[in-house]
Every structure is written in structure tokens, then in C-alpha cells.
Amino acid sequence: MEDRRGKEKEGSRGEEYGRKRDRVEKEGEKEGSWWKCVEKEEEGEGEEVKGIWKKVKDRMDKEKRREEEKVRERKARERRDEQVRRERKRRNLVWRGIEGDNFEERCLCLRVLLERMLERKVALRGVEERIGDDGKSILLVVLEKEEEVLERRGEVGRRWRMSVDENLTREERKMKWRIKERARLERSRGKRVEYDSRRLWIEGKEWKWDEEVESWREYKEC
């Protein structure tokens, strides 16, 4: 009886030892070279994927910056071109009521008029002839000192029954009308007013038309 109990104890001890040995062997396998190689391989694959995605992202960011730079350059070029176009157009004076049987005669008539008015030789450049809204011919002429002529537009009308004005768009003509109306109102109030087709000064202070609220506001530089 005692021998059987002793054998059972030894058997249970052996089983326990066997379980401990298996557990140690498994832990050893995890810590062994094969298991570490698997983990390193997985880590290596992760780093490789990260590296690839980083290259892709860097390339995409670089391409995006390049496109943004192209857009900025294009917009800057368009602004410069528009400024040049506006400057050229601003220097165009529109003449109406010029007599002559053909284009050459009308150009000659205009040149003689300018030379008499300015008392010097005048060379006409970039003259274009168009048909106005009233069906009559108008001349577009580029002058270096167009302000000198515009200041004497009243004389042009009185002496030669012609008219001269700036080459303005519909919006610019509308703004010019607003400026003249405000200038007339302020002068009737006894205020000192100066203006041109684009700007208005009342008592030495510049005023601008605010499109959002549709009213005049004193302009103050920031």
C-alpha cells in the first residue's frame, strides 16, 4: 500500500517536472534565435514600409510645393500684365467729333489741333479708329502726357467743338460719374474739392466709394 502511494507521489512529481521543462523550453524558444529572427524580420518590414511611404509623401509634398509656386508665379505675371494693360489703356485718349473724309485726314486734323493747343510739335502714336455707340468715328490716341490734354478738355470743346476723354470701362465711367456728383455736392456746400476720374479729395482728405455699403468713406492709410 505504501509502495503504491510512493509511486503515485513520484509520478505526480515527474509530471510536474515535465510541465516545468516544457514551459522552460517554450520560453527558451521564444527567446531563441529563430523567434528573434521572426520579430526582427517583422520590424524590418515595418521600417521598410515606413521608409517607402516617407519617400512617397516627400515626393508628393515637393510636387505640391512646385505646383503652388507655379500658381503664384502665374498670378503675379497676370497681375503685371493687367497693370501694363491698364496703364496703356489709361494713356489712351478718346477723341470724338474730329472732322475729315478719311482716317488720314482725321489724324492730320487732330495733330494740328494738339500742336496749336500745346504750342509744340506733336507726334501721334498708336492711333486707332473705331465706331462709337452713336455710329460716328472716334480716335484712340496714346499720349505721353495725357493729363496735359485732359486739363484743357474744356478748351477743346469750346474752340473746336470736339471732345476728349479717358478710355474708361463701363465700371470706370460709372465711378467717374459718382465722383463728379459727390464733388458737385460738396462744392455746393462751400468745401474745397479736387478730383479726377478715379479719386476724390474733400478738404485735402481722400474719399473712396465702398461697394459693400454703397457709400463714401474717408480713406485712411494703415
Image (cartoon, rainbow, N blue to C red):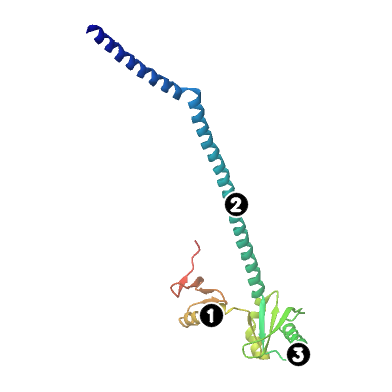
Considering only order in the chain, which callout, 3 or 2, is on the residue closer to the N terminus? Answer: 2
| 65, above or below 43, in the image | below
Q: Which of 111 and 172 is in front in this view?
A: 172
For label 1, the residue is 174
> Would residue 144 be found to the left or right of residue 194 on screen?
right
Mark 3 closeness class: few <14, some 14–19, many ≥20 residues within 10 Å: few
Callout 3 secondary element? loop
Q: Distance between the residues labelled 1 and 2?
A: 45 Å
Q: Which of 154 and 210 is in front in this view?
A: 210
- Residue 116, percent across and down? 74, 85
Numbered disc in front, either 2 or 3: 2
- The structure residue drawn at horizontal position 60% and vertical position 59%, both measured from the top left corner, is 71
| 17, above or below 76, in the image | above
For label 2, the residue is 63
| 47, above or below 58, in the image | above
Assign the N terminus to one quadrant of the image. Answer: top left
- The structure residue drawn at horizontal position 50% and vertical position 30%, both measured from the top left corner, is 38
For label 3, the residue is 102
Q: Distance between the residues labelled 2 and 3?
A: 58 Å
| 77, above or below 123, in the image | above
Callout 2 secondary element? helix
Q: Nearer the viewer, residue 98 or 119?
A: 98
> Would residue 80 be found to the left or right of residue 107 on screen?
left
